């Protein structure tokens, strides 16, 4: 997807949304004045009513302007995820305004059917004003909808459909004027009922989508499948689970757990997670933020077994007791701990010794390995010697459960 085709910067997004809304507001204001004047001149009650309807749209534009300003404010301490949900709430309000418009049109149409004999035919000039209203509102709808897609704004989408409802009401006026001129004034009321039903459906969809976003409904299955595939395509990711999504304003937020190789470094795990984040931001314009949790094991139930294990400081304090009297313990310069399968797997890296052959160094390392494995929470143990001491020795380590089938107690691989 072309990232440049949509505005992602909030500082650029707000002026564009504000400009779009102001264009709609001033257009509605000018059109309302034209409709009211035209309705009075042509004696068209329907045209006057449509002018009042257009004038009422300024309330919706005001709601949109306020929401645009507030929803694009940067994140703060009280709102660390930003203010995008204000836009969602405002779209629900606009949907409510559309529902009110639908109800008003339906009421007006029903009254027209009841009082059809008393209707007065307007002047033919009313056709011109009605046609201008239809064309203007349709152009405003298309402009707002195009900007909504570019800015990824559910609020502008709602406002665009509000403009489309105005197109429908103006078509009702046009049909009613034509019907009245040819001798069928009741056509105005019938068309109004149909349009009211259409507007009510649009309002229902906007309210439903807004409420679904407010309760953190996830993205559709097709988009989830694409996100899943994008994550799996990152080098280093072995599997994933707990892929969760939600919407906030015009953006999507993604949380995911990825499984990596169990004993890679922290920096490599971080690098893979950042690549996952960058891949999703690049692959989907709507994705604004990604939270990646790194797992060394796929089964969360097995990971929970490690929660009862001692922390690093606790474990090292306990191992210090196990190492009392062992000279190699004083040479430990680095300790790597791996919390897997409910055990702590330990790697000990020894600094170069002061002398002696490799056989003696390996024997001392084996004593350190055996002492470490006496801790009940320790699993695998590996002791790594310096290159000179380990030279010529077969790499070996200790593993829980080896039993009599070959528990190894020698030194680990050479340190290079």
Image (tube, rainbow, N blue to C red):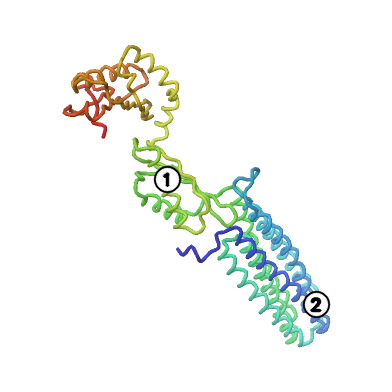
Dot 2 falls on a residue whose secondary structure is: helix
Q: Which residue is mark 2?
A: 36
Q: Residue at coordinates 65% horizontally, 58% vertically from top-left?
A: 91
View extreme (left): residue: 392
The residue under the point 36% across, 29% down is 336
Q: Quadrant of the C terminus?
A: top left
Residue pointed to by mark 1: 273
Question: With respect to residue 407, does 235 lie above or below?
Answer: below
The reply, left or right, for residue 349 in relation to residue 125 is left
Closer to the chain start, of discs 1 and 2, is: 2
In the image, residue 340 lies at what x, y percent?
A: 36, 30
Instruction: Tell me residue 303's x, y (percent).
Output: 41, 32
Q: Residues within 10 Å of mark 1 (few under 14, many from 20)?
A: many
Spatial distance from mark 1 to mark 2, Cα to Cα? 60 Å
Question: Can residue 197 be seen in the rendering of this structure?
Answer: no
Q: From the top left corner, tell me how far across and down residue 322 is, in percent.
A: 35, 14
Query: Is residue 140 visible from the viewing direction of this image?
Result: yes
Depicted 352 relative to depicted 199: above or below: above
């Amino acid at each position: 997807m072309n990232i440049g085709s949509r505005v992602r910067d909030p500082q650029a997004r707000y002026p564009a949304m504000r400009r779009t809304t102001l264009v709609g507001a001033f257009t509605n204001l000018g059109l309302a004045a034209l409709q009211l004047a035209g309705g009075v001149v042509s004696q068209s009650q329907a045209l006057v009513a449509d002018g009042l309807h257009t004038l009422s749209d300024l309330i919706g534009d005001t709601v949109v302007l306020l929401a645009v300003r507030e929803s694009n404010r940067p994140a703060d301490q009280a709102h660390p995820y930003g203010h995008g949900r204000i836009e969602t709430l405002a779209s629900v309000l606009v949907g409510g305004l559309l529902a009110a418009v639908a109800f008003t049109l339906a009421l007006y149409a029903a009254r027209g059917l009841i009082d059809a004999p008393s209707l007065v035919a307007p002047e033919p000039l009313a056709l011109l004003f009605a046609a201008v209203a239809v064309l203007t509102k349709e152009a405003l709808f298309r402009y707002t909808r195009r900007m909504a897609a570019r800015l990824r704004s559910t609020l502008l989408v709602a406002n665009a459909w509000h403009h489309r409802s105005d197109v429908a009401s103006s078509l009702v006026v046009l049909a009613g004027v034509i019907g009245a001129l040819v001798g069928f004034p009741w056509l105005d009321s019938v068309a109004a009922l149909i349009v009211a039903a259409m507007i009510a459906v649009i309002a229902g969809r906007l309210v439903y989508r807004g409420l679904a976003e407010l309760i953190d409904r996830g993205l559709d299955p097709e988009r989830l499948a694409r996100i899943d595939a994008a994550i799996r395509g990152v080098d280093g990711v072995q599997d994933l689970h707990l892929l969760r999504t939600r919407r906030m304003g015009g953006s999507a937020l993604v949380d995911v757990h990825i499984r990596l190789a169990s004993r890679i470094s922290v920096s490599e795990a971080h690098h893979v997670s950042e690549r996952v984040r960058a891949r999703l931001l690049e692959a989907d314009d709507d994705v604004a933020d990604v939270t990646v949790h790194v797992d060394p094991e796929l089964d969360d139930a097995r990971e929970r077994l490690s929660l009862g294990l001692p922390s690093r400081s606790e474990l090292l304090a306990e191992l210090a007791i196990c190492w009392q009297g062992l000279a190699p313990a004083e040479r430990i310069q680095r300790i790597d701990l791996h919390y897997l399968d409910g055990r702590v797997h330990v790697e000990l890296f020894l600094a170069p010794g002061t002398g002696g052959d490799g056989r003696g160094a390996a024997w001392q390392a084996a004593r350190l390995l055996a002492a470490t494995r006496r801790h009940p929470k320790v699993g695998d143990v590996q002791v790594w010697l310096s290159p000179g001491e380990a030279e010529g020795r077969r790499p070996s380590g200790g593993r829980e459960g080896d039993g009599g089938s070959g528990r190894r107690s020698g030194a680990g691989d050479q340190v290079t």
